[in-house]
């Protein structure tokens, strides 16, 4: 049997996607969201982390008309429909940007650097966007 299968079926791997970039101006945030949804479709254990300017991806009330791009932030509300419920935000990144959990459009778990490092160490695959 391959390492992706066991006697009881496919092996579930822990995938963590780390979003570090602002939501607009590059393709990283949207690409990350698409890869997260694809990975979740294959019944993998998916976590999504927001660090640095990536925390802006979750801010409520984004208005993108002025920059001529579609606001994809409401898509984060659909993640639980794909069983993606492990959303984490770096405490220092929020604080440095004057944000709190109340500013975010979906429920998250806010972690300090030590807890975030521990969580990352527990993953099988970590991809940074």
Image: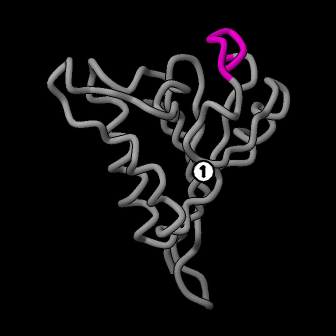
Crowd rating for badge 1 (residues with CA inside 10 Å; few <14, some 14–19, many 20+): many
- Identify the residue under disc 1: 47
Q: Position of residue 86 (x, y in %)?
A: 65, 53
Residue ID at (61%, 57%): 14
- State the extent of the magenta-drawn residues as a range: 93-99
| Lateral position of residue 86 relative to residue 23, left or right | right
Place of residue 11 in the rendered image (x, y in percent of width and height, measured from the top left): 58, 74
Residue 54, horizontal then vertical, whole percent: 50, 25
Residue drawn at the location 42% of the way across and 60% of the way down: 39
Q: Nearer the viewer, residue 3 or 104?
A: 104
Tally of numbered tags = 1
Residue at left offset 39%, top offset 29%? 62
Q: In the picture provided, is 85 more to the left or to the right than 19?
A: right
On whether residue 98 falls in the magenta region, the answer is yes
Image quadrant containing the C terminus: top left
- Label 1's element? strand
The image quadrant that residue 61 belongs to is: top left
Q: Closest to the observer: 86 or 62?
A: 62
- Is 35 above or below relative to 4? above
81 or 46: nearer the viewer? 81
The relative height of residue 17 versus residue 15 in the rendered view (above or below) is: above
């Amino acid at each position: 049997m391959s390492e992706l299968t066991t006697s009881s079926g496919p092996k579930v791997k822990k995938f963590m996607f780390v979003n570090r970039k602002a939501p607009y101006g590059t393709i990283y945030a949207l690409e990350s969201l698409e890869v997260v949804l694809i990975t979740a479709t294959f019944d993998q254990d998916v976590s999504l982390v927001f660090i640095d300017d990536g925390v802006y991806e979750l801010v409520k009330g984004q208005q993108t008309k002025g920059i001529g791009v579609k606001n994809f932030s409401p898509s984060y509300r659909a993640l639980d429909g794909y069983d993606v419920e492990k959303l984490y935000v770096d405490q220092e990144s929020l604080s440095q940007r004057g944000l709190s959990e109340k500013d975010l459009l979906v429920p998250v778990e806010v972690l300090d650097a030590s807890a975030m490092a521990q969580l990352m160490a527990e993953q099988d695959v970590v991809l940074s966007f």
